[in-house]
Image (tube, rainbow, N blue to C red):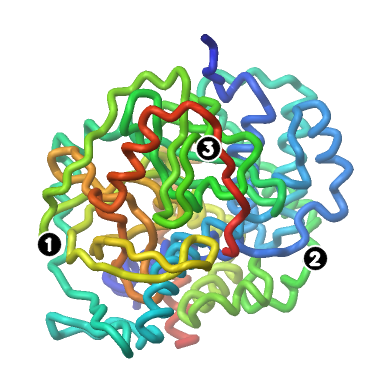
Amino acid sequence: MTSQDEITRTADRLKDAFGAAADVMMAGDGPVWGATADVITSVDKLAGVPGHKIGHPWRWLVPLTAAAAVAVIALVTVLVGRPAGNAVAGGPFTQVFSGVGKTQLVNVPAPDPAVLTSPGAQAAESRVVKIQGTAPECGRNIEGSGFVYAPQHVITNAHIVAGVTQRQTVTTAGGVTYRAQVVFYDPRTDIAVLDVPGLNVTPLRFSTQANPGDDAEVAGYPLDHPFTVAPARIAQALRVEGPDIYGSGHVAREIYQIRGIVRPGNSGGPLLTSAGTVSGVVLASAAGVRDTAFALTASEVQADASAGASARMPVSTQGCTLG
Amino acid sequence: MKPTLRPAEDLGEVFHAHQAGLVRLAAFILGDRGTAEDVVQDVFVRMHQRGHPMDGDPLPYLRAAVVNSCRSALRRRLLIRRHAEKDSPCPPLTAEEAAMLSEDRRQVLAALAALPSRRREVLVLRFYLELSEAEIAAMLGISRGTVKSTTARGLAALARALKETS
């Protein structure tokens, strides 16, 4: 016999396996068009789609499970040593990075789903957008989240637009797609700003008042899903050091460790307070540590946000990331 | 100022936005990526040839068309494993991709791949796309009751298979 508990657990395991498998498929490097390239080429000509490029895998959404985690974990590892394995249940503190330094993940109570019915979540929906673009140089599509934070300006992670030179678009939860241009690009902090003419949406506001233990929401467009809000809880603010998104140089960033499920595609979206202000920009999930993710703090992104808010001139998105 | 694009007005935009996601959907249902890519391409080609009028969000139509084409592909036994997936412990991933997953997740995907196709199809729609029972019923042209029972049987079979392997 199979108990109801077992059925529920099986459903959870299945969802989890789908998410992970979709992620590696997107990151994979397999032959994509192969034998059927001719067909897609004819569609291309008619529809104006560079099929062989579009078809290529997006090594990049990996950021959220792998690459973004790499962004953080790698930068922590460079300085601090290597990840010491999974979180251990029980104690209030779990040492996940050993070696030099004292970077520790802390445990906080599970997120409270009630936060999703707060006015904050509801108001945010129209301001959080899906970001897509094509980086022909490395043959990949990149997809992530972002949000309106100044008139006709959207903020996201730099790794979501890195190397993109074609079809940079922003799509609202209502399904309206706008052409967008990167007007500010900071691979050190991992922040980019897009100018989106015609996007007349009231901006979300930043708030630097978040504290450990606070309820929060992760809002964005996880892989193959429409606009999604997930409950989260702020665990702590951390100062981590490591390289920029290209793996070079040395950057110190202030990030929040959060408890909550962050999925591929959430990168660049807002970490919202229950009041609907933005306390951070979702950056990465922790590899191998369940329910744990990271967001750049509002204070960390403030300088970049101000610099990009009124920028109108396109800037280079440099090259693709290594992910 | 007319910077706004209605996605429905431009097949290229629609392709750009949805092709990769649709291939993942088809790959989970078919257990085979090569066929999944063909199925999705055929859907777009047909859409282009017919000049299918798209009002609003084209994704529900596209997903239904892909699921239908997957059924035809399975029915016509066109399912020939290509690429490296035949060596994979859990299609539609390649062996290399499978190696990036934990043992637990590999077991789940392998058990899924071994299910009868109709059950697998419903489980993919329910737990990958997270569609509601009503949405699945509408897409497949079956009753909600059938969606419910197929989901329950599929999960139970999966749970049994996982108990045996672990």
Q: Report the side of A215 relative to A278 (left or right).
A: left
Which residue is disc 3 drawn over? Answer: B139
Is there one chain holding both mark 2 and mark 3?
A: yes
A229 or B158: nearer the viewer: A229
Residue type marked 1: Pro
Which residue is disc 2 drawn over? Answer: B82
A3 or A267: nearer the viewer: A267
Which residue is disc 1 drawn over? Answer: A212
Sort mark 1 into few (<14), some (14-19) or many (20+) by Cα contacts within 10 Å.
some
Q: Is residue B139 above or below residue A201?
A: below
Residue B143 appears in the figure: no
Q: Report the side of B86 relative to A233 (left or right).
A: right
Q: Closer to the observer: label 3 or label 1?
A: 1
**Percent position of residue A316, x then y:** 58, 42
Q: Residue at x 29, y 67 (%)?
A: A291
Q: Report the side of A221 relative to B56 (left or right).
A: left
Sort mark 2 into few (<14), some (14-19) or many (20+) by Cα contacts within 10 Å.
few
Mark 3: which secondary structure?
helix
**Dots 1, 2 in contact, CB < 8 A:** no
Q: In which quarter of the image is residue B33?
A: bottom right
Q: Residue at x 72, y 37 (%)?
A: B43
Q: In this view, does A146 lie above or below B151?
A: above
Mark 1: which secondary structure?
loop
Q: Which residue is drawn at 26% across and 50% down?
A: A280
**Percent position of residue A84, x then y:** 35, 88
Sort mark 3 into few (<14), some (14-19) or many (20+) by Cα contacts within 10 Å.
some
Residue type marked 2: Arg
Quadrant holding the C terminus of chain A? bottom right
Q: Distance between the residues labelled 3 and 1?
A: 44 Å
Q: Is residue A275 above or below residue A257?
A: above
**Dots 2, 3 in contact, CB < 8 A:** no
